[in-house]
Amino acid sequence: MLGSGELGKEFVIACKRLGQYVVACDSYDDAPAMQVADERRVFSMLDGDALMKVVEEVNPDIIVPEIEAIRTEKLFECEERGIQVVPSARAVNFTMNRKAIRELAHTELGLKTANYQYAKTYEELVEASREIGFPCIIKPLMSSSGHGQSKVDTPEELPAAWECACGGARGDLKEVIVEQFIPFDYEITLLTVTQQNGNTLFCAPIGHVQKGGDYRESFQPRVMNSEHLKVAQDMAAKVTAALTGAGIWGVEFFVSEKEGVIFSELSPRPHDTGMVTLAQTQNLSEFELHARAVLHLPIPEITLYRQGTSAVILSEVETDKPDYTGVADVCAASCTDIRIFKKPVAHVGRRMGVVVCWDDLNASQDALRDKCKSLAAKVTVV
């Protein structure tokens, strides 16, 4: 597994329950997934030679990329050797770069997206933002979890946005995308499961709230117009089929009562907002779904059992020995669970854990969201 964060940790647990031997890789030691894997390797996955050296050593049956900063062209070599790449080398190569996936979705598949331009220099950024208009969204072409993303309302904010995008980029690609700001009513993640047998399944839509492009809370199901849901499912099925492969995909959409459903982004792996499925909202969590799809085990159906919410625990301190207070307060609450990711180092604003809550489908979702956020706020990184 290439990348060993909190999402990878839950995926490793799901794989271990299915009898798999997992080697977790990341650029730093003692990453969350390494703590539950059979072996670990520490190296930069942007170093193609180092990546292929580990492939030679491990001789894996399956390679599962879990981060963006990978020398993705090497995965084609692995696939040519007969190693299964998840979902496929084509999918990883496209989706690790916003430019490639946007061109596929908008130009080749005709999916509805926001207007956009690219910029490799600050001068190009100024011109692109002038063409797109203000407000606009500026993002690095390669990043995750909102790193480097800014909403820009005036030209005066462009210098800071350019620095933010360059500083938040993953890998060595220094190019940004300038997007039209869509005044959407809400946004969703549609977890989409593709299988070797060709049967594509969808989880109930997940609503989420982001701050600075990074997820803060999510809730499932996000109630939405049935026609809009059908459009989102059709788009998700179309783009995942074009990318090929088996696994779970986090497909993000903006939804506007006026503009309809607009494709935003896609990740070929479990999605951070999908951590709400750890509240056992459905028969299989997103991590269990991913593991079964990757191993080509059949998934006949996805059944929604109850509603759930998640809220993140953020660090407010810098420390290389993080500890936590308030965990007992969360554990004392009914219909609640907590995951401490056990990241070895805490940075200000770093996601260190998550609280999930659940209730019956007919209960008040607003009350459940408030409960979850209140409990997450009780946990402090010290």
Image: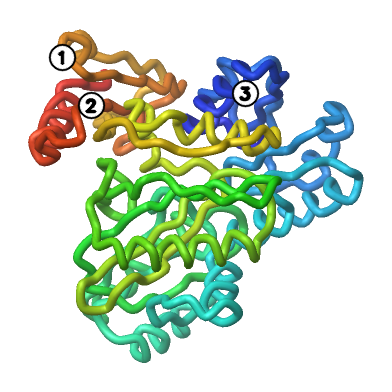
Q: Secondary structure at mark 1?
A: loop
Q: Nearer the viewer, residue 268 or 177?
A: 268
Q: Would you say the residues marked 2 and 1 are in contact, meaning their CB atoms lie under 8 Å apart?
A: yes
Q: Secondary structure at mark 3?
A: helix
Where does residue 362 sit, x and y in percent of width and height?
A: 14, 36
* Disc sitting over residue 15 in the figure: 3
Left or right: 37 in relation to 7 = right
Q: Secondary structure at mark 2?
A: strand
Q: Tell me the quarter of the picture where residue 320 sits.
A: top left
User: How many angstroms separate mark 3 from mark 1 (CA)?
Assistant: 30 Å
Drawn side of residue 302 relative to residue 243, left or right? left
Percent coordinates x, y for residue 75 in the rendering: 78, 50
Residue 58, located in which quarter of the rendered image?
top right
Q: Position of residue 183 (x, y in %)?
A: 21, 73
* Mark earlier in primary sequence (3, 1): 3
Q: Amino acid at mark 3?
A: Cys
- Residue at 69 percent across and 46 percent down: it is 197
Q: In the rendered image, which residue does mark 2 sit on?
A: 357
Q: Are marks 2 and 3 in contact (CB under 8 Å)?
A: no
**Amino acid type of the residue that numbered disc 1 sits on in the rendered structure:** Ala
Badges 3 and 1: C-beta atoms under 8 Å apart? no
As displayed, is residue 170 above or below residue 150?
Answer: above
